[in-house]
Image (cartoon, rainbow, N blue to C red):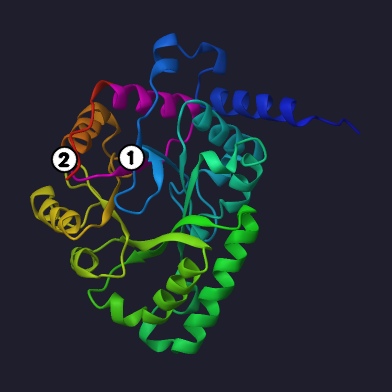
Amino acid sequence: MHVMNRRSFMVRSAGMAAMAGGLGASQVSAQEAMARPDQVPLGKTGITVSRVAQGTGMAGGNRQSNHSRLGFEGLVGLLRHGYERGVTFFDMADLYGTHLYMREALRSIPRDKVSLLTKVWWRYDGRDAKSVSPEIQKHSARLAIERYRHELATDCIDVVLLHCLYSNTWDKDLAAYMEVLDNAKAKGQIRAVGVSCHNLDALKTAAECPWVDVVMARINPKGEKMDGKPEVVIPVLKRMKENGKAVIGMKIYGEGRLVHMKDECIQFAQNLGLLDAMTIGAESIPQLDETLRILAKHPAAKVM
């Protein structure tokens, strides 16, 4: 049986991920190699992250995504390449099934040099949270946090979000999950808690909810895959910042619908002065390098 040492595995992984995107790792230009994202505070959480996170959930669902479909070597190589390029923030979710890929990447990426974000897919307990008893919600949430920590091989996860909220009453409907996350935070198992939103009313609730440390919100210049037009969403993001929330922008490229205008999308996000960080789900090394190169062209406005 052929045995591959870890260094060879990682080199091969990065090369395979690069070639999958149509560019060998050795072909990355000197200009691209210099384009590294800023390290920034994630709001008032005390967590430091790279300005852009590597997302892992493109076309995600049922514990798989385009990223996991890259295969073990492909995704681990992509994560490792991101870290080598200065990406220290990694965006995962139980729904994407990408924890174990990150766990393998952490064998060669220092855990204390990166920040990990994941999300609880509470709908595994029932589509309607109101139909699930608080006792079941709490039990499920406790098991989820323990499993995530095991899958990631870490004692503490930096950010844990309730995933994909649609209702303006989520703060009442999901109170039992929130209580468990709060307790895990008090025990040092989680550093910050919050939500990702897919509805304008849910976003407005997040802006006012004292429990929320971090909000993941959809934002781009054209309103693609967003909760409303930019002029409607931006005032809600401003309210979040006024209330001390950290805001992470997502759908920066409109879930792929705006890839023809990446430069404009990044410039828009950088100029808002409302995003502490953003997450972009590059699916190959060339895509990741391109995003970092564009990001370096457009310095971020001061975040309020």
Q: Is residue 100 above or below residue 31?
A: below
Q: Range of the magenta residues?
A: 273-296
Q: Is residue 82 above or below residue 26?
A: below
Q: Is residue 64 above or below residue 123?
A: above
In the picture, the quarter occupied by the C terminus is top left
Q: Label 2, on which residue?
A: 272
In the picture, the quarter occupied by the N terminus is top right
Disc with the residue nearer the chain's start (1 vs 2): 1
CA gap between label 1 and label 2 equals: 21 Å
Residue nearest the viewer, comparing 110 with 291: 110
Q: Identify which residue is drawn at 26% across, 51% down.
A: 218
Q: Amino acid at mark 1?
A: Gly
Q: Is residue 56 above or below residue 93?
A: above
Image coordinates of residue 141 in percent, x first then y, are 51, 74
Residue nearest the viewer, comparing 193 with 198: 193
Q: Label 1, on which residue?
A: 256
Image coordinates of residue 46 in percent, x first then y, are 38, 50
Image coordinates of residue 17 in percent, x first then y, are 57, 29
Q: Amino acid at mark 2?
A: Leu
